[in-house]
Image: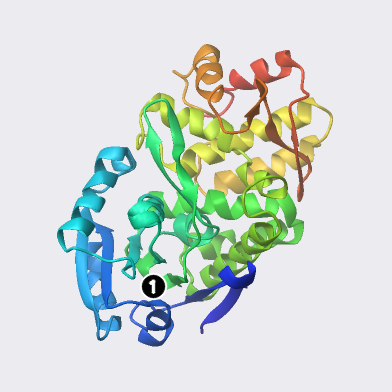
């Protein structure tokens, strides 16, 4: 049961293959490998699980491997430089294909390395976490973190293909699975109310890792993102809506130290904060907020930011967000479930109240 959809970007369009047990499929992988050299970038957790299976699909090419340490706090310039070192020591030419085998951290940093090496070499995304399969592997956002801000150094650079093997989720820790569900829920909130209702009906199947349910959720998430990226590749308009909860969430990640909170956990708390602010502005109803809270709770995700993060810290970290324009922090908010908008026009007092939310345990 394999499903394929396209990210429509003209001559740079590419397929997303979604299925179970497809990681070793040469027919999906090799048409997108142009040269005779491949550099697989993975990490120390994923390499023992899936590297050899990927190797079996790479035929008639020289395969080189760079294994990174595992964790968000390694998504930095120092580790990026180690990828360049590996590419140069081979040495890899301009036809080399970089393959990102791993979760969001591997995909982001390997993609950025591909965007920079010799001013750009092809790369392929093989995401192995739910969050990476439904979000970070699609759309061409690549980046590393800086101590003062998440994903502040990066580039838009599209992959040649995305191969999302649901079977890799069998080895995913529960906490990582739950974190990925935050990005799945996001698509329902920003533009697909029918999908949000579907998630309410099928959350138990997702939590139980039912293969058919996971494939459906990944496909619907990727379809939503592919449509947004096709309409606004470089985030000048509609694509900004994909950042629901992320401005709050990135502040949580930066303030607590990258990796203390998983990205999806921080986004979940951030989406709840955005929902509460939307309610205070007269958009979301109390019932809407209750539905959002209920679905996040069923996914075992945090509903509030960490208690130790105060208003001053939130403001400081959010001030370097990429959505700050002319000194005004623009936030993604909700008119209703399935309809998001971006605004910098909100009462400061309402935002301050949201910073102080601690009504539920995280």
Q: Residue at x 53, y 56 (%)?
A: 135
Residue 1 at x, y percent in the picture: 51, 84
Whether residue 145 is situated above or below residue 95 in the rendered picture: above
Total number of numbered discs in the rendering: 1
Does residue 226 appear in this view? yes
In the depicted structure, whether residue 277 falls above or below residue 205: above
Q: Position of residue 247 (x, y in %)?
A: 57, 33
How packed is label 1: few (under 14 Cα within 10 Å), some, or many (20 or more)? Answer: some
Q: Quadrant of residue 346?
A: top right
Spot occupied by residue 217 in the image (x, y as percentages of width and height): 58, 65
Q: As drawn, is 177 to the left or to the right of 50? A: right
For residue 103, side relative to residue 281 (left or right): left
Depth check: 132 or 93 in front? Answer: 93
Q: Which element type, helix, strand or loop, lies under badge 1?
A: helix
Q: Check disc 1 and report the residue beneath it.
A: 167
In the image, 156: left or right of 338? Answer: left
Viewer-proximal residue among 343 and 112? 112
- The image's colouring method is rainbow
The one nearer the camera, 192 or 31, is 31
Tell whether 316 sits left or right of 118: right
Residue found farthest to the right: 282
Quick check: 38 above or below 267?
A: below
Q: Quadrant of residue 122?
A: bottom left
Residue positioned 27% across, 85% down in the render: 59
Residue 115 picture location, percent across and down: 41, 55
Specify the farthest residue to the left.
Answer: 89
| Residue 304, quarter of the rendered image | top right
Residue 303 visible in the snapshot: no
């Amino acid at each position: 049961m394999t499903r394929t959809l396209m990210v429509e970007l003209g001559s740079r369009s590419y397929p997303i293959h979604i299925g179970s047990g497809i990681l070793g499929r040469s027919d999906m992988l090799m048409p997108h490998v142009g040269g005779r050299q491949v550099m697989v970038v993975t990490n120390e957790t994923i390499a023992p699980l899936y590297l050899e299976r990927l190797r079996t699909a790479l035929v008639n090419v020289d395969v080189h491997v760079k294994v990174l340490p595992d964790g968000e706090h390694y998504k930095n310039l120092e580790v990026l430089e180690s990828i360049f070192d590996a590419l140069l020591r081979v040495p890899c030419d301009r036809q080399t294909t970089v393959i990102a085998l791993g979760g969001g951290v591997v995909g982001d940093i390997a993609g950025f390395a591909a965007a920079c090496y010799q001013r750009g070499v092809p790369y392929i995304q093989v995401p192995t976490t739910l969050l990476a399969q439904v979000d970070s592997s699609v759309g061409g956002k690549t980046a590393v973190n800086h101590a003062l801000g998440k994903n502040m150094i990066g580039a838009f650079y599209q992959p040649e293909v995305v191969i999302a093997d649901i079977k890799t989720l069998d080895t995913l820790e529960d906490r990582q699975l739950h974190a990925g569900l935050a990005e799945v829920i996001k698509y329902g909130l920003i533009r697909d109310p029918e999908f949000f209702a579907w998630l309410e009906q099928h959350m138990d199947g997702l939590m139980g890792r039912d293969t058919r349910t996971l494939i459906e959720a990944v496909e619907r998430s990727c379809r939503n993102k592919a449509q947004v990226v096709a309409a606004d590749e470089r985030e000048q308009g509609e694509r900004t809506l994909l950042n629901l909860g992320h401005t709050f969430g990135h502040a949580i990640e930066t303030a607590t130290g990258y990796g203390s909170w998983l990205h999806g956990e921080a986004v979940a708390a951030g989406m709840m904060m955005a929902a509460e602010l939307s309610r205070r502005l007269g958009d979301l109803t109390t019932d809407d907020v209750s539905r959002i809270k209920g679905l996040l709770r069923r996914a075992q995700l945090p509903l509030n930011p960490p208690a130790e993060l105060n208003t001053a810290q939130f403001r400081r970290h959010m001030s370097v967000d990429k959505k700050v324009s002319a000194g005004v922090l623009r936030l993604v908010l909700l008119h209703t479930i399935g309809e998001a908008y971006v605004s910098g026009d909100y009462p400061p007092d309402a935002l301050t109240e949201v910073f102080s939310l601690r009504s539920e345990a995280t």
